[in-house]
Image (spheres, grey):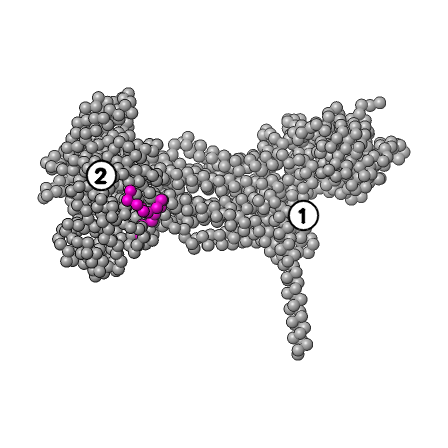
Amino acid sequence: MTAPVIEFKQVVKSYENGPPALGPVDLTVSAGEAVAVLGPSGSGKSTLLNLIAALDRPSSGEITVDGVRVERLGEAAGAKYRRARIGMVFQFFNLIDDLCVLDNVLLPAQLAGVGRGEARDRALTLLSALGVDGYAKHYPGRLSGGERQRVAVARALINRPPLLLADEPTGALDTASREDVKELIKDLNEQGQSIVLVTHDEELAATCATREVRLLDGRVVSDRALSAVSR
Amino acid sequence: MSRRRERRRAERHAAGARRAGSGSVLRKVARAGASRRRLQSLILILVTTGSMAAALLAAQLLAGVDAPFDQAFGRQQGSELTLQYDATAATTAQVAATAHASGVTASAGPFPTTVLNGYTTDLNMPGLDLTDFPLPQMQLIGRAAPGGPVDDVELTAGHWPTAANQIVIAEGSSPLDGSPMGTTLTFPHSPGDPTLTIVGVANTVSQTADAWVLPQEVSALAPAGTATGYEMLYRFASAATAAEVTADRTAVTKGLPTHAVTDAESWLTLQSAAQTGGNAIIPPFLGAFGILGVILSVIILASVINATVAASARRIGILKALGCTPAQVVRMSAMQALIPCVAGVALGTVFGTVGALALLSNTGQALNVGTPPLSMPIEVLVPISALALVVATAVLAAGRAGRMSVLDALAAGRTPTSGRGRAVQRRLARTRLPRPVSLGLAAPFTRPARAAALTLAVVFGVIAATFAVGVASSLDHATTDVSDNKGGVLVYIDANASGPPTAKDSAAALKAVEAQPGTAAYVSSISYPMSVQGVGEDGTVTEFSGGGAWSFYPIVSGHWFTGPNQAVVPTHLLRATGLHLGDTITVGEDGRLFPLTIVGEAFDTHQQGMEVLADAATFASVQHTVPLGSISIQLKPGVDQAAYLSSLNAALSSSNSIATVGQGGGGKLKLIMGALSVMMTLMLVLVAALGVIGSVMLDTRERVHDIGVYKAIGMTPRQTTAMVLTSVLSLGIVAGAIGAPLGIALHDYVMPLMGNAVQSTLPPDVLNVYQPLEVALLALGGIAIALIGALGPAGWAGRIRTATALRTE
């Protein structure tokens, strides 16, 4: 059995003394897994993702990601943790419109203090691997949705994070681009990348994930491995 | 017909209802916008308050320093002719009857008066201990109340005397000026050695008294054997020229005994002194600050309103998507900006008025013109103009936002997507600078107009600081360094005496100075009236003697005299007579003429710059009865100044003289101008910093989503703070580089105006005051203002939680 990359122990998250938006949740994700988190709106999917990324703190419980106790991290430590261990892909890409594609991809590496030359080589390799190296000097506004999401994935992977978090990665894409991104996520996982993706898209989950976790009203109501056939 | 009219009426009614409906909805949206966006509203209130206060204060100052003597003279119904009558030569009834002379339109008096000498005081303030010294003469007037048809005296502190032992001091009545209430004065030469308590300070621009008591107290205070007199104040139908005043005087004194009038003062003399005396330098100085304040306020207010509306672009996009027309968007934006700005204007009016009152009081004190009142038209016009500026800027900015496509407007919250600044961004990304720093440095280029406005605000802050430092330094040179006795410590001996000092006192003082072992050299001066070519009988000559070879006044051109028959003259005298260096100026007394070669032009405002300075040897044949004015002493190296002063004062005790550390002229003027310039500079720097805070905060809020993205991909709070701070760093550098030279240029433009105000050319030492290191530090002030202003927003950007930033729309 591979080492867990994520461990949730009795994690609860409540907002302003309201009912728990999430939890209590116990969840373990092993390295190399691609876990799709599914559920209706308000089920706690985004809260779960924010807790893993240290964008938010749990009300109680323990979260360990790649050996780091996440719930204790402050803003600065959280930023460093995300740099080193998390790659994030957002529904609306969140590329910086004023930076060209290459500079967008380079940004996390440069923030981490990686030399520009080294980071540039890695960025160009990633862009090439993701099929968007031709757009390195372009600005995000000129790219299609699928291309932008590929750039966002390249940016997420620039620091070789052990975990990739994707929040509705196909939510803002047309059909062709959606297929494109599905393939990309599947390929990444097949290369050993641990992935947690939050989605409404059952088909995306079925295609890309090795495991499916369903949430309802903040609780895990189903957690099952997906067969290779279904993928 | 009637049906058609009814239909038209119904249509008009419906249209009106629609307009009213949309108006009410817009008002609701605007109100909600202002109250929901609390930070934005708070910034607007703060900036509007600061700008409004600064603009109002500056405008009031500009009005207050415009012909201050004339303003005060009109306000106080100043005395156009003040006559002193000898009580033994004219009766009260005779003097009172002069009020009915031809041409007199108003009069006050007769007021009983006497002159007191040698009184002592318990005044002991830091830097001014007068407890042991008999003080010089004081003209005391008996007056029941400060008000009246002529010389409506302004009580600036305390109250008018209500009892026998109370006295009110005239503002500017040295050395008691600035005495706190409760200070006591003892008159040892008056019957019973009475002690009076200072209960008030009052201003008379007509300078009709040094102090006031109740009328019945004058005779009781008059020293035994001293004659009392009457003072009478007049205003005339025509007194605009010296000839008219002379004619008025003749009319008033017609029929009185020949020697009834012992002294006369024309308002024209006072006006001339006010316009050309040392205080005349204040209006151009404050005027420059006033103009800076108004311009800065307009820039700050306009740029922050513009940024506020621009920051609402997404909201405008939503409203347009819902069907708002561009005109409605403009109205809504103007209303939304107006709501907090009205509060800011109200607060700013209060603060500006309070500040203006304090500043006008200080200025009035410096100019000795009472307290100039607030200008009511300015109190009304400035707030209205500020609101008009707010509406105009909001309408322009909203017009721009209204013309944006809905999609572009909805995309707000992210860094602008235009090509502006991308080249800079790309180049900076390739440098070795830490990425947050290069991102910050590139930020201004994405919004060049906003960055320019912000830079301009900082530029004005730096100009103000540079100008203030320069003026303070120039004043220091012009007043402290009146002598070039730089080899030792300057010590002045002022003939402050328990009676008019005599030539005998002067001889004793000189003897005492010469006897001091610490004396290296000295120069003594005596001023006396002499006819001067081009000036007439009212001229003054100041002669210098002693072994010292230093100049008493800064030299503008030429050199200090090196021997007899040479003259150094102030600029005003040169201009008035049309003489130049190398020309001969003739002075004379009792038929003896002394032709002197002009060898130097001095910066000297004494005697309104109309005196001739020369070596005493020139006038060896003239017998003087006037005492020494002062003695400038150079101490031997290593002599302790305090010990020297103490020893010299002990030796001077019998000569009616005191030795003090020389501050030159203008000590009080320098202090007040220093305080005014510090206050004005702080205010302008504060307003500039407020502008930076507002602009950077709005800019940061506008880019909050991007900040969330930066943080999500690993930017630490410290890196975020550094990014925001560096976004203003380049602006601060540019502003410093522009502002410091402009501040120097303003100084170089205003200082000669200040010199012209006192009819003098300023010497190079007074003009060239900026040192390279000082200029470098002032230029760095731009960075300081920008960084101080950006600290708050940068801290906020660093602290904001990533999830919150990402969620922010």
- How crowded pointer 1 is (Cα within 10 Å; few <14, some 14-19, many 20+) is rated as many
CA–CA distance between discs 2 and 1? 89 Å
Check disc 2 and report its element: helix, strand or loop: loop
Q: Is residue B747 visible?
A: yes
Closer to the camera, B362 or A30? B362
State the mark number for residue B192: 2
The chain under label 2 reads: B
Quadrant where the C terminus of chain A sits is top right
**What residue does disc 1 label?**
B410
Residue B376, horizontal then vertical, whole percent: 42, 54
Going from the N terminus, do you reach mark 2 or mark 1 first? 2
Residue A173, horizontal then vertical, whole percent: 77, 43
Q: Which residues are magenta?
A: B152-165
Describe residue B634's horizontal placement relative to residue A229 as left or right.
left
Is B158 one of the magenta-colored residues? yes
Describe residue B42's horizontal placement relative to residue B458 as left or right.
right
Asked whether the beta carbons under mark 2 and mark 1 sit within 8 Å of each other, the answer is no
